[in-house]
Image: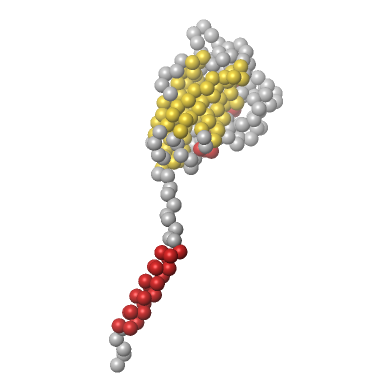
Amino acid sequence: MVEASSGHRGLLVPDDSPTGLLDGISVAGPGQIESLSIRLRLDVPEGGSARLGDLYVHLQHASGLAVLMNRPGRTAESPFGYSDRGGLDVVFSDTVALGDIHQLHAALAVPEQETLLETLTGVLQCAGRAVDPSSVDDTSLRTARLDGFNGHALEGTWNLFIADLSGGGQYRLRDWILTFETGAIAVPEPVPEPANAAVVFAGALVTTVLLRRTRPRNP
């Protein structure tokens, strides 16, 4: 297992701005990703407010992109998404049975229109909905999940992008942590050169002939 942490950040996410906030972690060393999870902690500045349905968050690496959140709770009937006001301390993982964060209230058996005020905690699947935030909904295909990084090298820069796409509140990035389950990078076995293959074959042939010559004849 390999873990990489951003350390304390305390960075405000711009309110009502597609420019958003970009933060990176550099990961060094060999290893091939077998699975990846990410812990994301966002809080709300004291005296401030925020709204979960405003958020768009993705994780990007040279090997691809995973959409962690894309206007959670947004549907055709609820175009503004969830009105939850608390912070987040959530682990995103594709290996958990609990549903994705886009349908958080259903996963928690909470009415869709209810407003949660406490910090959201737990382990959830990422949204995976790589579509325009202005048109995303619960039926959008989940094509950008964390398992898209599996099989790729973990080294390089991992970028977290967070945008608050509607006015009226503001989040602050506390920190984020990547956890990789890794295996050795597979190295293909060398293919013998034609000349070497011929030598091996010729050696086997000569050995066979010598054995035949030295084998005693039946009386």
Point out the image quarter for the C terminus: bottom left
Q: Pinpoint residue 188: horizontal percent, then vertical percent.
A: 44, 52
Question: In the image, what residue occupies the spot 43% across and 68% down?
Answer: 198
Expressed as whole percent of the image width and height from the top left, the position of residue 109 reads 56, 26
x, y percent for residue 185: 42, 44
| Viewer-nearest residue: 180 or 152 | 152
Outermost residue on the top side: it is 47
Quadrant of residue 176 in the image?
Answer: top left
Q: Residue at x 49, y 8 (%)?
A: 46
Q: Let me know if residue 180 appears in the view.
A: yes
Q: Quadrant of the N terminus?
A: top left
Outermost front residue: 195
- Residue furthest to the bottom: 219
Q: What colour-coding does the image apply? A: secondary structure
Q: Quadrant of residue 197?
A: bottom left
Who's the residue at 34% across and 75% down the image?
A: 207
* Residue 82 appears anywhere in the view: no
- Frontmost residue, 134 versus 96: 134
Furthest residue toward right: 76
Q: Where 140 sits versus 185, above or below? A: above
User: Is 188 displayed left or right of 76 in the figure?
Assistant: left
Which residue occupies the foreground of this view, 183 or 216? Answer: 216
- Answer with left or right where residue 63 lies relative to residue 79: left
Q: Is residue 167 left or right of residue 1?
A: right
Q: Position of residue 113 (x, y in %)?
A: 63, 19
Q: Nearer the viewer, residue 55 or 206?
A: 206
Q: How many marks?
A: 0
Residue drawn 55% across the image and 33% down it = 65
